[in-house]
Every structure is written in C-alpha cells, then in structure tokens.
Amino acid sequence: MKSYKENWKKLIGIGVVALAALLVLIGIGMIYHEKVKKDARVEKKDRTDYQYHVAIISENPTDSFWKKIYQGAKDAGKGDQILIENFGETLSGEYSTEELMEMAIAAKVDGIIVQVSDEEAVSAQIDKAEEQNIPVITIRSDAPASKRVSFVSGNDYAIGEMYGNQINNIAQKKAEEEDRKIRVTVLLNSEERNAAPNVIFTAISETTASIASKIELTSKVIDNTGMFESEENVRDLILDTSYPDIIVCMSAVDTSSAIQCVVDYNKVGQTSIIGYYAQKDTLEGIQKGIVESSVLINPTEWGKTAEQGMNEYLKKRHISEYLPVSPELITADNIKKYTE
C-alpha cells in the first residue's frame, strides 16, 4: 500500500513539472509569436516609408571595403526615403556585374549604383537600364561611353596635391641630411582603366615643382593584380642600387607590399612610404614609423555621395556628371581616430 502511494506521489510530481514546463513553453511561444507579428508590422511600415528602391552593385558584394560603401549609402538613404539594396549579397553562387545589372533591371528598381568591372559589358547594361528609365551612377570605376548619369570618384587632383605635399615635407628634410637629390618613385596601377593615375601624377608634379631641383620624381607602372605580383615588383625596386628614398603607393596592395619589403630588406628609415587606405598593416606601420602617412578615400563617404547624387536625380532629374569625394590624410598625429 505504501509503495502504491509513493508511486502515485511521484506521478503527480512528474505531472506538475511537465505541466509547468509546458506552460513555460507556451508562454515563450506566445511571446515569440507576438514579436514576429510586431517585427512584421515594423517591416511592413518600414517598407511603406521608402519612396524608391535602388540597387548598389559590385562584382564582389561581400568585400569589406564595398560593404562600407554600401553602409554609407544605406544610412544616407534612410533620410531620403530611398531603400538601398546591396544587390547580390544574399544570392548563392557568384555572378558578374553584368548579370547583377540584368537582374536589377528585371526587378524594375528605381535606380542603380554600380562599380564597373567590365566596361564594355556593363556599358551595354547601363544603356539598357536607361532605355527603361532606370538612372545609373557609376562609382570608383567608370564607363564614360555609356549613358550613365554621373560618376562618383575620388577628387584625383586633390589626392595628387595631398601626395605632393607629403613628398615636399619628407624630401626637404632628407635633402638637407643627405645633401643630394632625393629619389621619389610613384607606383601606378597596371589595372587602372581610368585616367586617375595620370591626373594624380600631374598634381604630384605640380605640387612638388617648388622642390624640383631637390628630387628625382619618377613613376613606375607595376603589376598589382595580386599580392605576389606586387611584392615582386616592389622588391625589385628596393633591391636596386638606386632604390627610392620615397615610395608613393596608390593602392592598398602596393602599400602592404612596400611595408613588407622595407621591413624584410632592412630599409626602415632609409625608404619612406606614403601609403593608400587604412588597412591594419598600414595603420600599424604609421604607429611604428615605417609608414609616414596614408591617403584615404573614406568608403562610407563614397556611398553617401553616391546616394546623395541618386536622390537628387530621382527627385529633380538633374545631377552633376562628376561627383568627387575628398581625400583624408592619416598621420601619426590623427591615427587614433582611425584605429578606433
């Protein structure tokens, strides 16, 4: 009899625990259900707040630099009732810029912001979009022969002036110490399709004209399609008997190569580096005195400028053909802002 009562108590206890667990699960389920309904209402409301849908397209939509461009555009679009979509980011598989453009046109977006990868192929898609009244703004790389409405680019002459002023500061000091002409080599991008390097180099030449008698200014087109190719080219420069006193880099890849080679071949303090962008090794190089400074076009500013241009065109049907983004200079004095 006692055993029967004990078993019955155990069963009641188990039943109470099971019931409590069930009630907890029901409660959680109800809370989750209400949250889903609330999120759905918010999402629906958010969608109705947008007046335009704009696709922003790159061949590599998951690239960290590109995602910062997208974020800059997206944040700016919220205040202008423009929904900016990083087109292709959630698609499985890899698609070319041309294919993503075709998808965006088929989706009947209100506008397209695109980084041109293949000028001829993308130009055809840009013209196709224009025929369907979809304005296209190119960013970072252009398709000037197409019917794009504007091009967002770095202010190339301002970039050249910034490089030139840095060369002046470094070369003046080195010339006094060495009592000879200071060798300056500007690394040009072999893959660049636009005229930017020529404009930048012209601005460098004009900005350094006041110390032309103190420097030997040369440019070198190098293969920087990959890290290995870039390092090989920079290494040859560093190991030359007339190695440069100042190396000016116009890409993040070349900056990383220059840092690596200067360290590997004990040229720290002998070859000064003026870099490009704000990747980790460049910032560390500035902190350690390996890199003098670095020129940066803030990626969020790229995106913000592109969105502002698209907003103007969608609402006024007017836009400047060229939208420049001003450069910033990273030095030991302001590096804390960038490392944070």
Image (cartoon, helix red, strand yellow):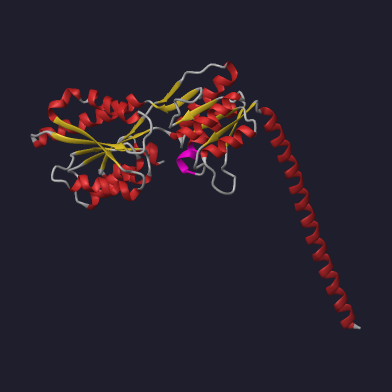
Look at 68% across and 32% down and name the residue there. Answer: 47
Residue 194: which quarter of the image?
top left
Q: Tell me where residue 5 sits by quadrant.
A: bottom right
65 is within the stretch colored magenta: yes
Provide the major secondary structure of the magenta segment: helix
Asked if 290 appears above or below 125 in the picture, the reply is below
Q: Is residue 119 magenta?
A: no
**Front one among 217 and 33:** 217
Q: Is residue 67 left or right of residue 265?
A: right
Residue beneath the point at 56% across and 38% down: 100
Residue 332 shows up from this direction: no
Give the x, y percent position of residue 10: 83, 74
Coordinates of residue 117 in the picture (x, y in percent): 46, 37
Q: Nearer the viewer, residue 252 or 179?
A: 252
3 displayed left or right of 338: right
Q: Nearer the viewer, residue 102 or 334?
A: 102
Residue projecting furthest to the left: 179
Identify the magenta region: 63-68
Q: Quadrant of the N terminus?
A: bottom right
**Residue 170 image point, x, y percent:** 20, 33
Residue 130: image quadrant is top right
Task: Name the quadrant of the C terminus.
Answer: top left
Residue 310 makes an appearance in the image? yes
Q: Position of residue 7 (x, y in %)?
A: 86, 78
Residue depicted at x 10% and y 36%: 177
Instruction: Pick whichever, 128 or 115, lies toward us.
Output: 128
Count of numbered badges drawn on the protein: 0
| Residue drawn where x is 81% and y is 70% of the image | 14
